Image (spheres, helix red, strand yellow):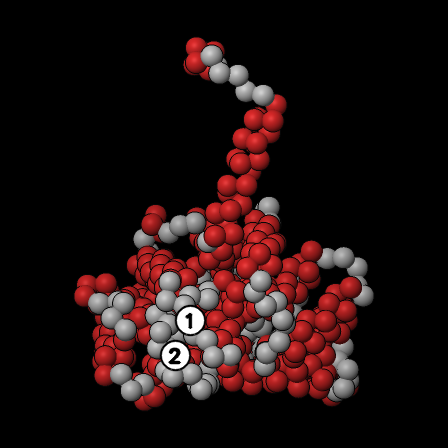
């Protein structure tokens, strides 16, 4: 104030109002100019918000802001807001079916949270991704984000395996009262399968980066060593199976010599990791117990049998979200659980929505595979990330998701968001190629 007085300058009310307006508009302009940063912030909020932890819904706030700014930017740039595509219609139908079920029962925050994680988040991110990641620079930023998340999750898993708990962040990962699988590398998801499938999906993205020499040198070597160890640390058989299958399939389908060498490197690193683990008595015993543990299998078989009988009782329309859980609890005895879950995405859809729901889900899965098919564009090679050879890996990413969905219900919003963001990028690229355009170079 003294400086202003000495300068002899006076500010009128219009000047102050103009300055205030500029101060408000400037951050809004930054978000409109770089929506990918808000997109990454939203994904990060979803990554670090476990479903069993009650606190301010930062992820929901970020999600709403992302929708608002991306739509506002699309209107300003006159981008097409058409909601179409091979994934859109079946997913929208499943979203509306589930919404009806949630609205017909008393309000429950957890039910609405699961509804958002399973359907709203992936549906929205699928369509927003095509509007945000429309040039090579934005795609490159997404690739960088994916590699950073992979590095973080791998390190946390390795720290957990080595017992270096002081290095694990955030600390709630170690809280046994939250989530499940406290004895495994579960990461911020608080669930080992969710952590494992994310590591697997991001690992395939990293393989593509290695093929394009985005990853090289010491960093590439660290990735080849760390990823198999991180997968091993999840101590989850479904994750081990899907990871091994994805590496073998990538080795077989890729025409890139560099990528095939990376797959061989991952296989060798995994084999060495198993040998090292076998040489440590406590670790070897822990892994052996996981391989021989039959209790989860017995529990799942009881749940599957009860779920199948429920489907046979109502095969066409299903039981709906409001009555499925109470009915399942009535039919299961011998296990002391507060709540019972299907542990299978397809069975849950079948029991909740009947054959109609399963048909819609199969239609959606077919659409996911279709968005990765190569179109009539020259080579789609002007993209720094989603080139033709990435499309050969896309079916493997989808299969990793589907295999793990056979053992859990995919209600993890970061996992769903990651897969459907990639699908949305591919779908948008297909639309541009069909229109005679291509990914912009900057």
Q: Residue at x 25, y 77 (%)?
A: 262
Q: Which quarter of the rendered picture does the C terminus lie within?
A: bottom left
Residue picked out by circle 1: 439
**Residue placed under numbered mark 2 in the picture:** 380
- Residue drawn at 50 percent across, 50 percent down: 31
Real-space Cα distance between discs 2 and 1? 8 Å
Looking at the picture, tell me which residue is in the foreground, 302 or 438: 438
Q: Residue at the spot x=60%, y=59% of the render?
A: 75
Residue 52 to residue 258: above or below: above
- Position above or below: 9 against 60: above
Tell whether 380 sits left or right of 318: left
In the foreground, 228 or 184: 228
- Residue 185 in view: no
Q: Depth check: 221 or 430 in front?
A: 430
In this rendering, is residue 152 above or below 429?
above
Q: Position of residue 81 (x, y in %)?
A: 61, 67
Asked whether, in this view, residue 136 is left or right of residue 262, the answer is right
Question: Does residue 271 appear left or right of residue 320 in this picture?
Answer: left
The reply to whether dot 2 and dot 1 touch (C-beta < 8 Å) is yes
Give x and y (percent) for residue 49.
53, 54
Give percent across and percent down for residue 253: 34, 88
Which structural element holds mark 1? loop
Could you say whether the residue bearing mark 2 is in a helix, strand or loop? loop
Q: Nearer the viewer, residue 442 or 208?
A: 442
The crowding category of the residue bearing disc 2, from other C-alpha atoms within 10 Å (few below 14, some 14 to 19, many at least 20), is many
Is residue 320 visible from the viewing direction of this image? yes
Count of marks placed on residues: 2
């Amino acid at each position: 104030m003294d400086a202003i007085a000495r300068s002899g300058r006076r500010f009128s009310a219009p000047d102050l109002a103009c300055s205030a307006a500029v101060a408000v508009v400037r951050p809004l302009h930054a978000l409109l100019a770089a929506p990918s940063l808000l997109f990454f912030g939203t994904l990060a909020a979803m990554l670090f918000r476990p479903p069993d932890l009650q606190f301010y819904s930062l992820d929901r706030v970020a999600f709403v802001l992302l929708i608002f700014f991306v739509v506002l930017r699309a209107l300003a740039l006159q981008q097409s807001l058409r909601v179409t595509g091979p994934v859109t219609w079946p997913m929208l139908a499943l979203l509306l079916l589930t919404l009806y079920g949630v609205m017909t029962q008393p309000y429950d925050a957890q039910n609405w949270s699961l509804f958002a994680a399973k359907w709203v988040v992936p549906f929205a991110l699928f369509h927003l991704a095509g509007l945000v990641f429309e040039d090579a620079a934005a795609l490159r930023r997404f690739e960088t984000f994916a590699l950073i998340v992979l590095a973080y999750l791998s390190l946390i898993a390795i720290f957990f395996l080595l017992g270096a708990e002081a290095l694990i962040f955030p600390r709630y990962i170690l809280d046994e009262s939250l989530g499940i699988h406290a004895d495994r590398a579960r990461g911020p998801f608080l669930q080992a399968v969710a952590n494992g499938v994310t590591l697997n999906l991001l690992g395939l993205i990293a393989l593509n980066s290695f093929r394009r020499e985005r990853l090289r040198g010491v960093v590439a070597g660290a990735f080849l060593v760390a990823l198999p160890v991180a997968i091993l640390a999840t101590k989850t058989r479904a994750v081990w199976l899907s990871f091994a299958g994805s590496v073998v399939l990538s080795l077989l389908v890729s025409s890139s010599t560099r990528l095939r060498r990376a797959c061989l490197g991952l296989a060798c690193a995994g084999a060495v990791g198993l040998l090292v683990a076998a040489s440590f008595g406590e670790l070897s015993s822990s892994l052996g117990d996981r391989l021989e543990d039959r209790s989860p299998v017995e529990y799942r078989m009881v749940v599957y049998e009860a779920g199948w009988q429920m489907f046979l009782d109502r095969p066409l329309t299903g039981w709906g979200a409001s009555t499925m859980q109470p009915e399942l609890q009535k039919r299961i005895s011998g296990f002391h659980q507060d709540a019972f879950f299907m542990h299978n995405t397809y069975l849950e859809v079948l029991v909740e929505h009947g054959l109609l729901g399963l048909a819609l889900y199969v239609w959606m899965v077919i659409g996911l595979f279709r968005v990765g098919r190569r179109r009539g564009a020259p080579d789609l090679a002007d993209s720094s990330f989603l080139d033709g050879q990435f499309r050969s890996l896309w079916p493997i990413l989808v299969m990793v998701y589907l295999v793990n969905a056979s053992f859990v219900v995919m209600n993890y919003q970061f996992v769903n968001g990651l897969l459907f963001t990639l699908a949305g990028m591919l779908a948008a690229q297909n639309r541009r190629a069909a229109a005679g355009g291509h990914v912009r170079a900057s």
